[in-house]
Every structure is written in structure tokens, then in C-alpha cells.
């Protein structure tokens, strides 16, 4: 019910969390500042984690930084492109999680803090003109 109310009041925007990992604090801090300044994300949370994974036939056990980029459905594609373009990994993790249940005040803040789609200009060539 809350999600319906949020969508009805906010032009059908949906909250999105993009998840990624970074090799160090410097790289995530840089991209976090860029995407928040450009209003591609309202907020970026990051914290140090340990990751165990297979890479090029070898088991790796490394420290990384997990990043949660909070955005909207209207800004997610540009944010994904910016993450992919600037990411230091050969194969960056970019995972999208849809916010199914979010408070109205938080959703309003999220949408106000990110880019909004600008309405497309209509082609008025089919309008009748006076001779």
C-alpha cells in the first residue's frame, strides 16, 4: 500500500539500490562524490568487507569496499553508465535491487536529490496553422 501511494505522488518513480564493490577507499570515495554531485545518486553508503571469489582460475581472499548507490528508476541508467565508465575493475559488479517497500518521506527525498527526467518536447508539426 505504501509503495502505491509513493508511486501515485511521485510520477511513478521507483527507488533503486545499485550494488558494487571497489578495491580501495580512494576509488569508491571518488565515484561517490562524483555521482552525488551530478545527482545520479542521492546517497552512496560504503564499508570495508572481505570477499572470497574465483578469478582467473584462482581463489582470491581480499579486502574490498561494498558500495550501495541509492537512486531512482529515472536516474539508474545514467548511474550505471557512470559506474561502468569509471570503475577500476575489468569486470565491475553492478547489481540492481528495486526498493519494494519504502517510506513516503524517504522516497520524496530520494527523488528530489536525483535527476528527474525532463519532459520531451512535443512535435507540433501536426497542429493546424493559420494560413
Image (cartoon, grey):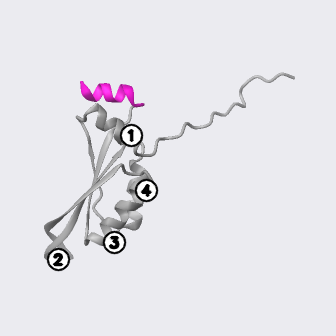
Task: Judge depth for marks 2 and 1 and give the one in front.
Answer: 1
Task: Judge depth for marks 3 and 4 and give the one in front.
Answer: 4
Quadrant of the image occupied by residue 20: bottom left
Report the quarter where the N terminus lies: top left
Mark 1 — residue? 111
Horizontal side of 4 relative to 114 (left or right) equals left
Labels 3 and 4: the sequence-earlier one = 4
Q: Could you say which is closer to the camera, residue 119 or residue 29? A: 29
Labels 3 and 2: the sequence-earlier one = 2
Q: Position of residue 39 (x, y in %)?
A: 43, 51
Q: Position of residue 74 (x, y in %)?
A: 42, 42
Mark 3 — residue? 88
Question: Answer yes or no: do the residues labelled 2 and 1 have beta carbons within 8 Å?
Answer: no
Label 2 Cα crowd, 10 Å radius (few <14 / some 14-19 / many 20+): few
Report the quarter where the C terminus lies: top right
Labelled disc at residue 37: 4
Residue appearing at x 39%, y 31% in the figure: 10
Question: Answer yes or no: do the residues labelled 2 and 4 have beta carbons within 8 Å?
Answer: no
Residues rendered magenta in the picture: 1-11
Labels 2 and 4: the sequence-earlier one = 4
As measured in the structure, the alpha-carbon distance from the residue carrying label 3 to the one carrying label 1 is: 28 Å
Secondary structure mostly taken by the magenta-highlighted segment of the chain: helix
Residue appearing at x 76%, y 22% in the figure: 128
Quadrant of the image occupied by residue 68: bottom left
Quadrant of the image occupied by residue 90: bottom left
Amino acid at each position: 500500500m505504501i509503495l502505491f501511494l509513493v508511486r501515485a505522488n511521485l510520477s511513478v518513480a521507483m527507488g533503486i539500490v545499485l550494488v558494487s564493490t571497489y578495491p580501495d577507499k580512494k576509488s569508491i570515495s571518488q565515484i561517490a562524490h562524483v555521482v552525488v554531485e551530478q545527482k545520479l545518486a542521492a546517497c552512496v553508503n560504503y564499508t570495508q568487507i572481505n570477499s572470497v571469489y574465483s578469478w582467473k582460475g584462482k581463489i582470491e581472499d581480499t579486502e574490498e569496499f561494498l558500495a550501495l548507490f541509492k537512486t531512482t528508476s529515472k536516474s539508474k541508467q545514467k548511474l550505471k553508465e557512470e559506474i561502468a565508465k569509471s570503475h577500476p575493475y575489468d569486470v565491475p559488479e553492478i547489481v540492481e535491487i528495486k526498493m519494494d517497500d519504502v517510506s513516503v518521506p524517504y522516497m520524496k527525498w530520494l527523488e528530489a536529490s536525483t535527476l528527474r527526467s525532463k519532459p520531451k518536447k512535443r512535435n507540433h508539426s501536426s497542429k493546424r496553422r493559420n494560413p
